[in-house]
Image (cartoon, rainbow, N blue to C red):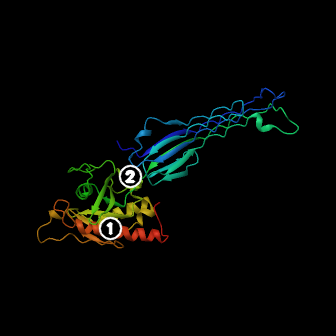
C-alpha cells in the first residue's frame, strides 16, 4: 500500500538528574561534594533511507520516544546519555510541525538526517555548585524535559521527468516500456491509483527517473478525481511530458485543461518546462498524421507509440537534453526543487 502522509508524536528523552553525594575517602577527613551530572536525553532523528518508498511504517505506530538520560552518581560519575531514536523515512520526505504548520526540514538525499525532537539537557550534580563560601552544597538540578512535537510527514517522490495526462492517456504503458517499472495497465480509466517510478536507461550509461501519476481530470486542483492527492509528487520533477492520445475527442482542449490544472495547483508546477507527446499513434492509418495542437512554450512535440516503440527514442533523448539544461541552470544559481 502506498502511504504518502503520516502524523506522528515524537518525544525527546528527558535528561537525567544531577546527584547529591559526598566523598568518604580514607585520609580525607572532611571529604567533599562528588555528585555527578545527569546524562543528556536522546533525540528523535529522521534518516533518509533509499530502500524505502512509502511512509507505511508510521501508519499504525504514531508515538516515538527517545531514551531518557541516566541520573548522575557519586564519585563525580556522569549519567549515561540516552540513545537517539532514528526513524527511517524515504528520500523526499518533508517534516512539518503540526502545531504551527511550519516546515521543520526535508530529507532529499539518502543519508540525510533531521532532528525533530531534541533530548533534554542533563541536570548538574552538587559538585558543580562548590564555591569558596559553599564547601558542602546540597544543591542539584533535575534533568530537562525533552521536546514533544506532533509532526506531519509528507512524501514527495523524487523524479526527473513527470508524466501528465488524462485517464487512459497511456502513461503507465509508456513507463512500463521505457523502464523496468511494472505499473498496472488496463483498458479502463483510473487504473493507476498510486504514483509509479521507473529508471530510464539510455546509451552511454545515462539514466534518469520518470514518474507516472494518476490521470488528471478537470477540477483536479480542487480535489476532484485522484489528481489532487498526487499532484505534489511531480512538483519536484525538472520537466514534464504531457501525453495526449491521438484518439482523444479534443486534444487541444485536453492540453489546455491539463495546463490550467497544473497552474492552478501550483505556480511552480505550471512553470515547469514541458513537452507534448501524442501517444497511441499506432491507431492512426499509414498515411495519417497526429492532430495538430498549439503548445506555446513547450520545448518539444513528439509522436510516440508504446505498442510499436516508434518515437520513444527521440522523446527520451529530448528529455535528457532538457534535464541537462535544467541542471546547468541550477548550477548557475537558478531555481531548484521546491
Q: Is residue 299 above or below residue 73?
A: below
- Badge 2 marks a residue whose secondary structure is helix
Pointer 1 or 2: first along the chain = 2
**How many labels, in total?**
2
Q: Which residue is mark 1?
A: 320
Residue closest to the eye, 77 or 106: 77
Q: Residue furthest right?
A: 133
Q: Residue at x 57, y 41 (%)?
A: 43
Q: Which residue is mark 2?
A: 230
Q: Residue at x 30, y 69 (%)?
A: 318
Q: Residues within 10 Å of mark 1 (few under 14, many from 20)?
A: some
Indicate the position of residue 140 as horizontal and vertical percent values.
75, 33
Q: Is residue 280 above or below residue 105?
A: below
Indicate the position of residue 230 as horizontal and vertical percent values.
38, 52
Q: Residues within 10 Å of mark 2 (few under 14, many from 20)?
A: many
Instruction: Judge from the rendering whether residue 235 lies leftward or rightward of residue 116; answer left or right.
Output: left
Instruction: Judge from the rendering whether residue 2 lies leftward or rightward of residue 174; answer left or right.
Output: right
Q: Is residue 235 above or below residue 49?
A: below
Of labels 1 and 2, the one closer to you: 1
Which image quadrant: the N terminus? top left
- Indicate which disc residue 127 carries: none
Q: Residue at x 29, y 67 (%)?
A: 276
Indicate the position of residue 6 as horizontal and vertical percent values.
46, 42
Q: Is residue 21 above or below residue 87?
A: above
Residue closest to the eye, 148 or 171: 148
Q: Quadrant of residue 257?
A: bottom left
- Badge 1 marks a residue whose secondary structure is helix
Indicate the position of residue 188 as horizontal and vertical percent values.
22, 50
Instruction: Judge from the rendering whether residue 56 lies leftward or rightward of residue 215; answer left or right.
Output: right
User: Disc 1 versus disc 2: distance between alpha carbons?
Assistant: 24 Å
Residue closest to the eye, 54 or 272: 54
Q: Residue furthest front?
A: 27
Amino acid at each position: 500500500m502506498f502511504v504518502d502522509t503520516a502524523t506522528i508524536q515524537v518525544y525527546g528523552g528527558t535528561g537525567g538528574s544531577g546527584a547529591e553525594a559526598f566523598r568518604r575517602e580514607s585520609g580525607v577527613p572532611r571529604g567533599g561534594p562528588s555528585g555527578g551530572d545527569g546524562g543528556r536525553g536522546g533525540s528523535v532523528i529522521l534518516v533518509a533511507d533509499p530502500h524505502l518508498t512509502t511512509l507505511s511504517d508510521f501508519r499504525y505506530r504514531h508515538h516515538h520516544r527517545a531514551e531518557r538520560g541516566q541520573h548522575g552518581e557519586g564519585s563525580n560519575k556522569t549519567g549515561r546519555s540516552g540513545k537517539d531514536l532514528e526513524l527511517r523515512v524515504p528520500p523526499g520526505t518533508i517534516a512539518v510541525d503540526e502545531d504551527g504548520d511550519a516546515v521543520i526540514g526535508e530529507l532529499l538525499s539518502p543519508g540525510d538526517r533531521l532532528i525533530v525532537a531534541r533530548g533534554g539537557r542533563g541536570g548538574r550534580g552538587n559538585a558543580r555548585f562548590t564555591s569558596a563560601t559553599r564547601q558542602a552544597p546540597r544543591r542539584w538540578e533535575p534533568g530537562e524535559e525533552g521536546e514533544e512535537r506532533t509532526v506531519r510527514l509528507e512524501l514527495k517522490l523524487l523524479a526527473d521527468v513527470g508524466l501528465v495526462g488524462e485517464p487512459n492517456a497511456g502513461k503507465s504503458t509508456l513507463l512500463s516500456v521505457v523502464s523496468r517499472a511494472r505499473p498496472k495497465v488496463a483498458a479502463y480509466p483510473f487504473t493507476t491509483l498510486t504514483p509509479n517510478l521507473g529508471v530510464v536507461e539510455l546509451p552511454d550509461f545515462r539514466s534518469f527517473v520518470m514518474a507516472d501519476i494518476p490521470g488528471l481530470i478537470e477540477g483536479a486542483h480542487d480535489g476532484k478525481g485522484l489528481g489532487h492527492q498526487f499532484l505534489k509528487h511531480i512538483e519536484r520533477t525538472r520537466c514534464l511530458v504531457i501525453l495526449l492520445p491521438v484518439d482523444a475527442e479534443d486534444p487541444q482542449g485536453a492540453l489546455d485543461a491539463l495546463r490550467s490544472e497544473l497552474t492552478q495547483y501550483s505556480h511552480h508546477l505550471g512553470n515547469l518546462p514541458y513537452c507534448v507527446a501524442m501517444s497511441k499513434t499506432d491507431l492512426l492509418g499509414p498515411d495519417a498524421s497526429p492532430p495538430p495542437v498549439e503548445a506555446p512554450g513547450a520545448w518539444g512535440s513528439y509522436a510516440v507509440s508504446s505498442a510499436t516503440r516508434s518515437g520513444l527514442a527521440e522523446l527520451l533523448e529530448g528529455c535528457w537534453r532538457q534535464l541537462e539544461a535544467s541542471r546547468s541552470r541550477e548550477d548557475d544559481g537558478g531555481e531548484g526543487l521546491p
